[in-house]
Amino acid sequence: MHERSLVKTLIEQVLEEGRVRGLGRIHEVRLQIGEFSGVEPSLVESAFAEMASESWDTAVRLTVEVVPLTATCLTCSEAFHVESFRFVCPRCGGGNVQVTAGEELRLVSVLAERQTACEGVRP
Ligand SMILES: [Zn+2]
């Protein structure tokens, strides 16, 4: 049920953006979900499909971009994709790594009738 509350917050945020910016009919909502955010994209999509129809009369498309989990080694500065949640540097084998992407859940943009709005707003 974690995803449902996230989607509820997301929809409220989109509605608020629409009010503040005077947007027309909303066509599409774009979202970034990190691999390591603990959020399941398919559950977000199904919750959105269900809850969007309660908020808007017309269909609003949700586009989810999954952000790979990447990290940087603090020992040798290697940037790499973390696979199977193994936080070990593939170059030097060190475990002193810092996650650089893949933990986010971010509303990227809202496509509406009048204009594109709200870049990079966090839910
Ligand atoms: Zn390294």
Image (cartoon, helix red, strand yellow):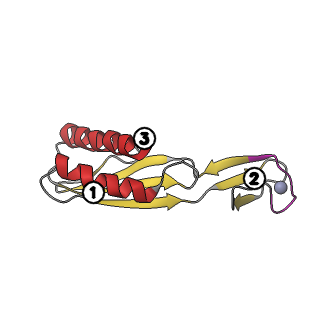
State which region is magenta: 89-97
- Quadrant of the snapshot with the C terminus: top left
Q: Is residue 38 visible?
A: yes
Determine the CA span between mark 3 and mark 2.
Answer: 26 Å
Q: Is residue 5 above or below residue 57?
A: above
Determine the CA span between mark 1 and mark 3.
Answer: 21 Å
Determine the CA span between mark 1 and mark 2.
Answer: 35 Å
Q: Quadrant of residue 58?
A: bottom left
Which of the two discs, 1 and 2, sits closer to the camera? 1
Q: Amino acid at mark 1?
A: Ala
Q: Residues within 10 Å of mark 3 (few under 14, many from 20)?
A: few
Question: Depth check: 80 or 86 in front?
Answer: 86
Position of residue 29 measured from the top left corner of the image (x, y, whole percent): 31, 55
Q: Is mark 3 within 8 Å of ligand 1?
A: no
Q: Kindly report the secondary structure that dominates the magenta region of the rendered protein.
A: loop
Identify the residue under disc 2. Answer: 87
Identify the residue under disc 3. Answer: 122
State ligand 1's quadrant.
Answer: bottom right
- Residue at point 42%, 60% (across, down): 42
Q: Earlier in the sequence, mark 1 or mark 3?
A: 1
Question: Depth check: 61 or 121 in front?
Answer: 61
Q: Amino acid at mark 3?
A: Arg
Q: Earlier in the sequence, mark 3 or mark 2?
A: 2
Furthest residue toward front? 1
Q: Amino acid at mark 2?
A: Phe
- Residue at point 42%, 41% (across, down): 122
Q: Residues within 10 Å of mark 1 (few under 14, many from 20)?
A: some
Assess whether mark 2 and mark 1 are in contact (beta carbons under 8 angstroms): no
Q: Quadrant of residue 4?
A: top left
* In the displayed structure image, the side of residue 67 where residue 90 appears, left or right: right
Identify the residue under disc 1. Answer: 49
Indicate the secondary structure of the residue bearing disc 3: loop
